[in-house]
């Protein structure tokens, strides 16, 4: 039996949104963006180009698994960017396509458009980072919980989705699983046990790997949890103001970084999300889609709470799962508003047209604002990382080759690009050389300290100094 064109149209629109998402990444962010610190840590775990960078306690192995098919074959960051552009676009389609089995209408592709056009989605789409995939896995998982009522295969998909999420960020997956389990108990009449078992099985994959690694490298699970908590500055806190300041960048608001002032335009955008969420739930109150939207909203709130009240710093990407899940009720509200512009409108033709125009203007403003932020941050990132690339090229010209250790600001990226071991710093050099640096010196490796605008510790003053392109300088330890 042929499907009707009207039923095919939302899937075609979702595919179009996914393609446009990939194209927007290429145009606004560019695959020429150099590699970042966190990316280098993940990529170096599976790359034959350089020794693995220090893998701190909070990190998980999902991103190295994601990039391994490309990284083991080539050290080209450009190729990695193209690969991740394709993967992220396909993941956007796959996550929201789950919801087309719940509601085969234009709300789903509109939700994908809203989330895919966020600057966070654009900026991180082609980067080797976990947060986008956690966000899309959360969208798919919420839909699969709903589908478990009538689909025997939905629990299998739910287990796979939670496995992906827990491999990427185990803590996020745990919070999401608790919220989804509560939702499953509330909305499912059948297959509750299957849904709960799927959530547990998915969690077991990521948490199991994380626990095994904790035992092997961190002295046990509890020790790793304590170290991860110290690294992420966890404890009761309130970081709403920090998140508000970082709405339009920077990518990290921590360690005394200049997060800049609050952008009034960005705050208006931020406040519009909960307002539109409420309107979306209200507009769906008498229809069959209220329960699925409530599940997505409840999961979003649960995933926001730790980052707003328990992690003592802000990174905009932490809230990506929240924006992804809330795109569904926001799209519901936007679609309801746009429908008011088509007679017959219960509120009256003039008011209906006014609301529809306001919603359309809001959507265009969202696209313009988020695209501009993504472009601006990517341009700044390209400049900074191009400077790192030039400094790296000069060090390579000067003969820095393995065995070597690069210590300092952006030392992780420079070390990776040179094929060296690395030890990065965030604010300042240690007053005493770290144990890994001392060990490299004892082993006869060439040790280079790279820096710009930072005070050097006394033990480096006797090292040979060389200026590098741009603001960078290098100090070579004497062997």
Image: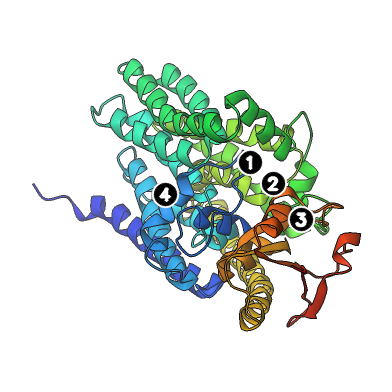
Whether residue 346 is visible here, answered yes or no, is no
Quadrant in which the C terminus appears:
bottom right
* Residue located at (72% from left, 59% from top): 250
Question: Which element is circle 2 on?
Answer: helix
For marks 3 and 4, give the CA distance: 26 Å
Label 2 close to label 1 by CB (< 8 Å): yes
* Residue located at (42% from left, 48% from top): 107
For marks 1 and 4, give the CA distance: 35 Å
The quadrant holding residue 57 is: top right
For marks 3 and 1, give the CA distance: 35 Å
The quadrant holding residue 440 is: bottom right
For marks 2 and 1, give the CA distance: 6 Å
Q: Earlier in the sequence, mark 3 or mark 1?
A: 1
Question: Which element is circle 3 on?
Answer: loop
Estimate how packed mark 2 is, as few (under 14), some (14 to 19) or many (20 or more) residues with alpha carbons within 10 Å: few
Q: Earlier in the sequence, mark 2 or mark 4?
A: 4
Tag 4 residue: 65
Estimate how packed mark 3 is, as few (under 14), some (14 to 19) or many (20 or more) residues with alpha carbons within 10 Å: few
Tag 3 residue: 426
Query: For the residues carrying marks 2 and 4, which lies nearer the camera in this image?
Result: 4
Q: Which mark is residue 271?
A: 2
Query: For the residues carrying marks 3 and 1, which lies nearer the camera in this image?
Result: 3
For marks 2 and 3, give the CA distance: 32 Å
Q: Position of residue 93 (x, y in %)?
A: 36, 53
Tag 1 residue: 274
* Residue located at (49% from left, 20% from top): 182
Relative depth, front residue between 371 and 162: 162
């Amino acid at each position: 039996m042929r499907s009707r064109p009207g039923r095919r149209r939302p899937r075609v629109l979702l595919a179009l949104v996914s393609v446009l998402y990939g194209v927007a990444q290429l145009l606004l962010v560019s695959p020429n963006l150099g590699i970042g610190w966190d990316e280098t840590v993940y990529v170096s775990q599976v790359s034959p180009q350089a020794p693995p960078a220090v893998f701190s306690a909070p990190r998980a192995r999902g991103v190295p698994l994601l990039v391994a098919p490309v990284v083991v074959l080539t050290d080209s960051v450009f190729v990695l960017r193209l690969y991740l552009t394709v993967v992220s676009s396909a993941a956007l389609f796959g996550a929201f396509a789950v919801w087309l089995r719940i509601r085969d209408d234009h709300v789903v592709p509109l939700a994908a458009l809203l989330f895919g056009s966020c600057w966070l989605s654009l900026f991180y789409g082609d980067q080797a980072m976990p947060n986008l995939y956690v966000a899309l896995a959360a969208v798919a998982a919420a839909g699969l919980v709903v589908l478990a009522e009538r689909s025997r295969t939905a629990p299998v998909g739910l287990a796979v989705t939670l496995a992906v999420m827990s491999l990427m960020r185990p803590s996020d997956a745990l919070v999401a699983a608790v919220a989804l389990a509560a939702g499953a108990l509330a909305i499912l009449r059948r297959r509750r046990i299957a849904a709960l078992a799927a959530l547990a099985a998915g969690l077991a994959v990521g948490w199991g790997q994380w626990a095994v690694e904790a035992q092997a490298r961190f002295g046990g699970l509890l020790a790793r949890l304590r170290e991860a908590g110290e690294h992420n500055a966890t404890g009761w806190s309130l970081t709403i103001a920090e998140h508000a300041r970082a709405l339009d960048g920077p990518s990290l608001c921590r360690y005394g970084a200049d997060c800049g002032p609050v952008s009034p335009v960005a705050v208006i955008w931020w406040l519009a999300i909960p307002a539109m969420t409420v309107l979306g739930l209200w507009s769906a109150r008498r229809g069959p889609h209220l329960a699925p939207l409530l599940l997505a909203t409840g999961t979003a709130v649960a995933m926001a709470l730790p980052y707003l009240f328990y992690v003592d710093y802000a990174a905009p990407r932490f809230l990506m799962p929240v924006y992804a899940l809330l795109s569904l009720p926001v799209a519901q509200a936007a679609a309801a508003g746009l429908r008011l512009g088509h007679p017959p409108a219960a509120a009256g033709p003039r008011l209906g047209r006014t609301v529809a125009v306001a919603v359309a203007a809001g959507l265009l403003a969202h696209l313009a604002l988020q695209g501009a932020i993504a472009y601006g941050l990517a341009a700044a990132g390209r400049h900074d990382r191009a400077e790192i690339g030039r400094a790296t090229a000069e060090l390579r010209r000067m003969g820095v080759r393995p065995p070597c250790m690069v210590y300092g600001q952006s030392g992780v990226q420079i070390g990776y690009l040179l094929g060296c071991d690395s030890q990065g710093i965030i604010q300042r050099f240690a007053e005493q050389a770290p144990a890994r640096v001392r060990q490299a010196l004892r082993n006869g490796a060439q040790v280079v300290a790279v820096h710009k605008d930072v005070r050097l510790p006394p033990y480096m003053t006797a090292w040979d100094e060389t200026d590098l392109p741009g603001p960078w300088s290098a100090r070579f330890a004497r062997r």
